[in-house]
Image (cartoon, grey):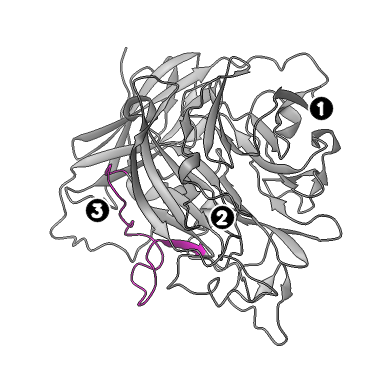
Amino acid sequence: MSTPQRTAVLGLACFLWACGDDGGNLQDNNPSSVAQVTVGAPATTIGVGDSVQLQAVARDADGNALEDRTVEWASANTDVAMVSASGVVTGVSPGEAQVSATVDTVAGTIGITVSSTEPPPPGNGTPGLERIASGLAFPLGLTSPPGDRRLFVVEKGGTIHIIQNGAVLPQPFLDISGQVSGRAEQGLLGLAFFPDYASSGRFIIHYTDLQGDTRVSVLHVSQDPNRADASSETAILSVRQPGPAHNGGQITFGPDGMLYIGLGDGGSTNGADDGRGQSLGDLLGAILRVDVSSGSGYTVPGDNPFVATAGARPEIWSYGLRNPWRFSFDRATGDLYIGDVGETDWEEVDRARAADGAGRGLNYGWSIMEGEECQRAGCDPTGLTPPTVVYGHDEGCSIVGGYVYRGQAVPSLRGQYLFGDFCQGWVRSLAADGSSSAAVDQPALSPGDNITSFGEDDACELYILTASGGVFKIVPR
């Protein structure tokens, strides 16, 4: 079978990875040699007829990203998946396909699984909930490694449990409860698997240590695939916290393969966050973007927005956030959605389109603004990014950001961003395509308890976690 070669300019894919034009030091008359090409995707499992945008990043021997290089895309099995000149891969038939991106004779590959497009399970297609686990200790997150059907559930106290074949395994995947503080909003707060987890076994956790400070660490799995090697922990980021609240906690790999880390403002009362939300010299109150592909520590991507700003922390991607407890990228479009927890009056959803930079350099306004309102008389909102959706504390108290549903089981929810409220336990949806700016109540998705988090598995199906220890899957009824 022939393998078609298609060509694109690397910069054309920048609508998803938000390439900057001010971070490179390349000279046209002395281009750097390509040493490595990495290929990333929002999802590595797609259905027949579905498409996903791939991204290729070429780097030199020092790890610097090289822009404006020609990329040749190819599929090793065109009967399973085709790839376009711009790196859009489309499922043709069930199976596995390796897709490669070649830059100056150096190739990177990614495995794509194409699943059969099966009809939805019996039911009328309206969404509902199915309890798949109970008895967990304050679960705060759920995710899966790429290409893995297991569900990994994060507990506030410092453990991670696996749900496999419908049952919670008796032994935890990881237990670091002896090194996690659990006051107020502290705890083991986030988990993300490296895109190459199947081969590297590496994952990242985000927690508050016994001093109450933020710690982001890399670990790897042991020889037992259901047990992590706790002794392998290597801290890559530590941030001093002024108090036990507003720690953020989300970590996720973006469509560009970079690691995004959410940090709250460290706690405030009556809007007095000591300027942390608006400070570029402080990592708090921001979403960070770093490159952890080297295997040790992190580097700052050259296209981060504040790399060349004097006095700014170059890790910062977006700022002006009070407590971005949960944020996510739309697997189909790369758009960034942030659920930012409010102070006394307003909760908000912030949406940043991939085509506009996916949040690159945006200031969301805290603590000048809360929602759409000034925190103090005479404030100037010029240059601040307003929220996409707000709701008042007469409707809830603490937003829980979710995901855009891109699964197959509930067609009526596809393309809807789901979010909820911790106190009231309701769930609402927002059209991801912008066809409506109104949030719609989804009463059938209320679990009847405090919602702590949403979760997403590798097949893009969604879950809801509750403070009393329940895990619910969104299913058709």
Asked whether residue 94 is in view, the answer is yes
What is the three-letter code of the residue carrying label 2? Gly
Which SS class for mark 1? loop
Residue in the foreground of this view, choosing between 366 and 309: 366
**In the image, what residue occupies the spot 37% across and 74% down?**
309
**In the image, what residue occupies the spot 56% across and 55% down?**
248
Which SS class for mark 2? loop
Q: Which mark is residue 64?
A: 3
- Can you say whether 363 is above or below 126 in the image? below
For mark 2, what is the residue?
A: 248
Q: Which residues are magenta?
A: 293-318
The residue carrying pointer 2 sits among few (fewer than 14), some (14 to 19) or many (20 or more) residues within 10 Å by Cα, namely: many
How far from the left and from the top, in percent, is residue 302?
A: 31, 59
First in sequence: mark 1 vs mark 3: 3
Label tally: 3
- Can you say whether 157 is above or below 337 in the image? above
Prevailing SS of the magenta stretch: loop
How far from the left and from the top, in percent, is residue 66?
A: 26, 52
Q: Residue furthest bottom?
A: 378
Which SS class for mark 3? loop
Q: Is residue 172 left or right of residue 75?
A: right
**In the image, what residue occupies the spot 68% across and 36% down?**
465
**In the image, what residue occupies the spot 36% across and 29% down?**
201
Say which quadrant the C terminus sits in.
top right
What is the three-letter code of the residue carrying label 3? Asn
What is the three-letter code of the residue carrying label 1? Thr
- Can you say whether 274 is above or below 112 in the image? below
